[in-house]
Amino acid sequence: MFKVRLAILGALALFIVSGISASAASASGPFWHVGGTSLNGTRQIKLQSKGPLFLKVPGTLEIRCENSISEGGTIEGNTTTQGQGKGRTLYSSCKVLVPGEEKCLVGDTLTNRGQIKTSPIKSYLAKAGQTGIVEVFEPGQGNIFTQFNLVTGKSACAFKEVGAIGSAVAEVIPARVEGQEGLISFPEKAILKVIHEETEVTLPSLKTVGAVGTFSGVYAARLATFPENFGAFET
């Protein structure tokens, strides 16, 4: 009888261990790490542009913004899904390079002149790019990243209401390293294929004024609990 009980307990232990192993195997990174361990919860994060940022539709529309910051940004993590995040982005000192400020100005009033504000945005970590880890940004609700107005300068502006839909992907720099500050870099050539939950996914192109465009630029990222270290890792 004692041997039977041992056998049952042994089988039960094996079942439990197998279940834990299966659960661990099903966890799908990359993950945010904070302070040396995988993040399980939420941290506030702050983004600040490093240099100008560009929204381009070749030969049709090009907007340059000198400054950009995040609003209400967070990163999130648990033990079973890839690292995620959410927030908004604010842009200021924005100018129309194509077709030019003599035709179009950003903002339909003096109070919002040169300013752009996104809709709520969500993000998740995935595998791609030169560093191997990227952050994919998508509209938090619906399919609109942002919507803003252009007004006529000295001559007629062909655009009035401008919207952006689709996705934008930034490389995480550096990857697999924790630090007090990191970079997320949106390359001029858009990244449209990523490995998400171990499956290759083709992402929708960023589109504005009805055509495929690109968003490029670099942000510095640090936790609100600075100088707490953080980073992105595959496991």
Image: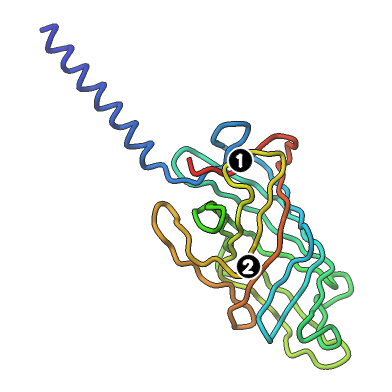
Is residue 56 rendered to the left or right of residue 152?
Answer: left
Kind of residue at badge 1: Val
| 12, 213: nearer the viewer | 213
Q: Secondary structure at mark 1?
A: loop
Residue 209 occupies quadrant:
bottom right
Is residue 228 rendered to the left or right of residue 36?
Answer: right
Estimate how packed mark 1 is, as few (under 14), some (14 to 19) or many (20 or more) residues with alpha carbons within 10 Å.
some
Kind of residue at badge 2: Phe
The residues bearing labels 1 and 2 have C-alpha atoms spaced at a distance of 30 Å
The residue at 63%/65% (across/down) is 187
Residue 133: give x, y in percent of width and height: 54, 52
Residue 91: give x, y in percent of width and height: 77, 64
| Residue designated by label 2 | 145
| Residue designated by label 1 | 177
Dots 1 and 2: beta carbons under 8 Å?
no
Estimate how packed mark 2 is, as few (under 14), some (14 to 19) or many (20 or more) residues with alpha carbons within 10 Å.
many
Q: Secondary structure at mark 2?
A: strand
Q: Residue furthest bottom?
A: 155
| 168, 172: nearer the viewer | 172
